[in-house]
Image: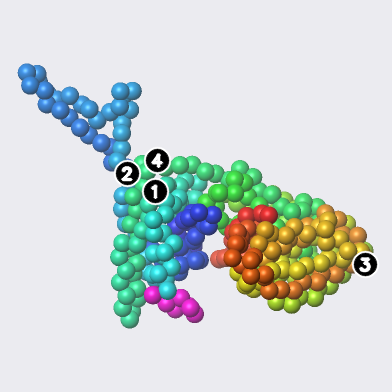
Amino acid sequence: MYHSLIINVGDDYIDTWDDWKLIPSSRPVIAPPIERTKFVTVPGRDGALDYSRTPANRPTYDDRTGKIEFYLENDYAGWDWETAYTTICETLKGQRVRFALEDNPSHYYSGLLWVDQFKSDKGHSKITLEYNLHPTMYTLKVEAVALNVYDLKLNRGMEYQLLVGVGPTNTFYRKMNVTAKPRDVVKITQNGTILALRKGTAVVTAECGGVKAECAVTVGAYESFTIERALDGVSETNPVGSIVAGMSYQNVFNVGDSEKEMLELTVEMGGTDVTGSCVVMAEDNASAQIKMASVTGNIKITAHAAAKPVAAMLCNDTLPVEVKPLKRVEGAFRLGKGKEV
């Protein structure tokens, strides 16, 4: 943990360490609002009238203002001080943002955040973010954690991709803790999949913001089907090669260049074309999601990137697809970005 800020700009949630490699020079705090005080002297009477409160006798406050200084870790490929400075300035410029401290994601603030100073030398670089925020500190806690499966069957050596959702989706809790017990039956891989180690039963628990969801896993000897794919210029988020009969299956496919390429995807199950019933294509045709409630045969996926027609490139309203695999970050898993189709 680097005591990051979690910044919400538009639909994106930016972690100042994970995304910008910023380390605060001291543990960040947000300045409290200053209560307004206004006293008026009235001729002919003692003392002064107190106009610092509202007619309902409530105090009023000025905005929260302050600065947070960061060291920039620029020893990463493609992330030097100039790239960092340009990226951060362009992201925040003119934007009304919401942000929370990673140490206290239950509460967030709303207002302006911008680059105040940037200094670079051979030893290290510093960047200072200045803020002007509404006096109110808002509360937004996690209310629900959802899994794509709650009862899972696997054969020994088989993997299954675990997908996790959090409600509300605009929470500032952006990391998920996923554990498996007992560890000798199943384990959670670096890619967020459940890997079956030996026959037995186990429980996989996903926890975020104090809210938990559990999946009961049974490792045995079950009928299973293979997942075969032929991909050309297309990436996927779920590379598992087999699945137990009757289990659900989900995957997301993306082309390399969404501005110039479109995705062509077909899916067969048990030798029958099921593309129309299980594939959800994004509006820009650059990505698609496969959703199968129950697998009843071997799956064959064929996908390739084709050039977009010129007209499509000129009027392209992109619609990102959600569902990304869990990514391990400092022993936890980071939630993906995006919207569902």
Would residue 195 appear left or right of 41 to someone viewing this image? Answer: right
N-terminal of the pair, mark 2 or mark 1, is 2
Q: CA distance from mark 2 to mark 1?
A: 9 Å
Tell me the residue that label 1 is attached to. 111
Q: How far apart, in angstroms, are the residues tagged by discs 4 and 2?
A: 9 Å
Q: Are marks 2 and 1 in contact (CB under 8 Å)?
A: yes
Q: In terms of secondary structure, what is the magenta stretch mainly?
A: loop
| Residue at the extreme left of the image, as rendered | 44
Residue designated by label 4? 136
The mark nearer the N terminus, 1 or 4, is 1
Check contact, mark 3 vs mark 2: CB within 8 A.
no
The residue singled out by tag 2 in the image is 63
Dot 4 and dot 3 residues touching (CB under 8 Å): no
Which is more N-terminal, label 2 or label 4? 2
Circle 4: is it few (<14), some (14-19), or many (20+) Cα within 10 Å? Answer: some
Q: Quadrant of residue 73?
A: bottom left
Q: Which-is-in-front pick, marks 3 and 2?
A: 3
The mark lying in front, picked from 4 and 3, is 3
Q: Secondary structure at mark 4?
A: loop
Please indicate, yes or no, whether residue 62 appears anywhere in the rendered image.
Answer: yes
Amino acid at the residue labelled 2: Asp
Badge 3 amino acid: Gly
- Element carrying mark 2: loop
Circle 3 is placed at which residue position? 271
Q: How many marks?
A: 4
Question: What is the magenta range?
Answer: 75-82
Residue 229 rendering spot, x and y as whole percentages: 81, 73
**Distance from Cα at disc 1 to Cα at disc 4:** 10 Å
